[in-house]
Image (tube, helix red, strand yellow):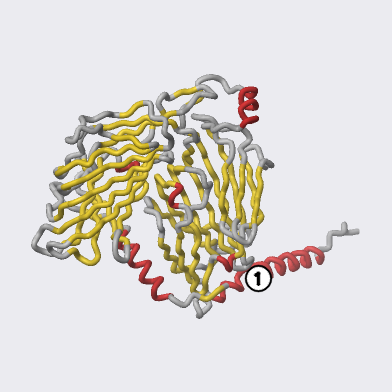
Amino acid sequence: MRSLHNWGALVSLFATLAAAAEQLVLPADFTPPRVFKQSNLLRTIDLTKPYAREIIAAVVENISKQPQNEFYLPVDKATLPKLSYVEARNKKGSGEEFVVTPVKYNDDSSLQYYRILFEPDVPAGHSITLQISLAATDILVPVPAQVTQVEKQFLQWTGNQYALSAYTTEKQKTKLKLASNEVPDFTKLEPKADGTEDPTKSGNQFTFGPYSVVEAGNAGEEVTLRFEYTNPVIKMDRMERLIEVSHWGGNLAIEERYWMTNNGAKLKDQFSRVAWAATNYYNPPTTAIKQLTFPLSVGAKDPYFTDEIGNVSTSRFRSNMREANLELKPRYPVFGGWNYTFVTGWNHDLRDFVRGHKNGEDFVLKVPFLEGPKEAVTYKDLEVTIVLPEGATNVKYVSPIPLVKEERYLHKTFMDTIGRTAVKLTAVNVVDEQHRKELVVSYHLPQSEALRKPFVMFSALMAMFTLSWIVSKIDLKIGK
């Protein structure tokens, strides 16, 4: 187990991210002060996956007479529960990330806000190039809702003509990148001032604008696009990830349980195995889930794949010095509206994930918060449970993903006395983009705890031998 030297930096990281997780409470009549204007804004919406990824790049100018550090991002109330993440950073310079905090002020308002805290402050008359990244699930809807086994699948996106902003925008443009070139339906707006069509199409990209002087709060007209999507719409209704740390065995055991649904267009008629076998012969694109590939951390070993029936033999594990891939095939193709539940797990050497302080009693665990398949996936409910060695105390963690719930309890297993410290973290609306983000857990484990399990085993054996000796001394003969 390697030593951790930069302990002070870790403590600072815990404090910074704990502050970022707090919710900001403001008065019910709150309105963002108009201290900024956006001289230029480019909104890029990526619809190549079964969820919407949006990047807003804007030149933000401080038009007040004082330095400012609070920028407010409005979000439609209906979109708010679908958001997976909201991140912001300085696009130029060092590219540092800004603290983003949800605002609670009026539950009845149609607009909700996130506050972005600039560090350092933006001086009066100066500007900053701000980049905001966000993702939202359950935005794309299959239209039509049902297709046959061999028909094409189309998804429909509905959004706004303008980027919603709390500040005046002098010039802006929106680009949409779709999963294919086939777009049978889309909203056509009035021609632009130069007579060109709005939007313009180039391959699988649509461009709305540019538009001049869009006032704060103006979202413009509602626009829709319907495009072909040849992949399954994979959603994990629930995923439970168990990470078990064993100092005695020098092992890190990971197990994941999935409740999977294909949220694509539902199968209109009954499933035809003959048609499925025929299409598999030339392997065309399909909206059914027929394989998942898990890119695991290097060094993964002892993988397994089971479902409600038992062990599933249709899996393949490939591992070398550079990568480790676990390929899983469900027992049947999972078409739109179908479900599949399965369990997978593997082990790692603990020394690759745990670092120890020089005092021999403080440790830091750094492990991916989420691994999962490399295919485009969304997670409705995600539970990550970290089970630490028996006797671990002073447990702290830093989550790279916003959490909705935390629970601490004692997890009792074989030969435990008081039970192992466990921390259960719950997140919602997680997307596959957040794979490999590291969860950091620090804990204190006294060296005396290393003697607990040998003492328990020794005591149990001695009790058994003593009981056997006492029983052997009992005279069970029938008296004369």
Is residue 138 visible in the rendered image? The answer is: no
Q: Is residue 229 above or below residue 318?
A: above
* Label 1, residues with CA under 10 Å away: few <14, some 14-19, many ≥20: few
Q: Is residue 214 left or right of residue 446?
A: left
Quadrant of the image for the N terminus? bottom right
Most distant residue in the bottom direction: 359
Q: Is residue 237 left or right of residue 284?
A: left
Q: Position of residue 436 (x, y in %)?
A: 48, 56
Is residue 56 visible in the rendered image? The answer is: yes
Residue depicted at x 28% and y 60%: 90
Residue depicted at x 15% and y 55%: 36
Most distant residue in the right direction: 480
Q: Is residue 111 above or below residue 465?
A: above
Q: Quadrant of residue 174?
A: top left
Q: Could you say whether the residue bearing mark 1 is in a helix, strand or loop?
A: helix
Q: Quadrant of residue 252?
A: bottom right
Residue depicted at x 43% and y 25%: 145
Most distant residue in the left direction: 65
User: Looking at this view, is 323 or 421 the one in front?
Assistant: 323
Q: Position of residue 190 (x, y in %)?
A: 20, 30
Quadrant of the image for the C terminus? bottom right
Residue depicted at x 42% and y 50%: 426
Q: How many marks?
A: 1
Q: Position of residue 120 (x, y in %)?
A: 23, 67
Amino acid type at image mark 1: Pro
Residue that badge 1 annotates:
454
Q: Position of residue 358 (x, y in %)?
A: 51, 80
Q: Quadrant of residue 14?
A: bottom left
User: Looking at this view, is 352 or 97 the one in front?
Assistant: 97
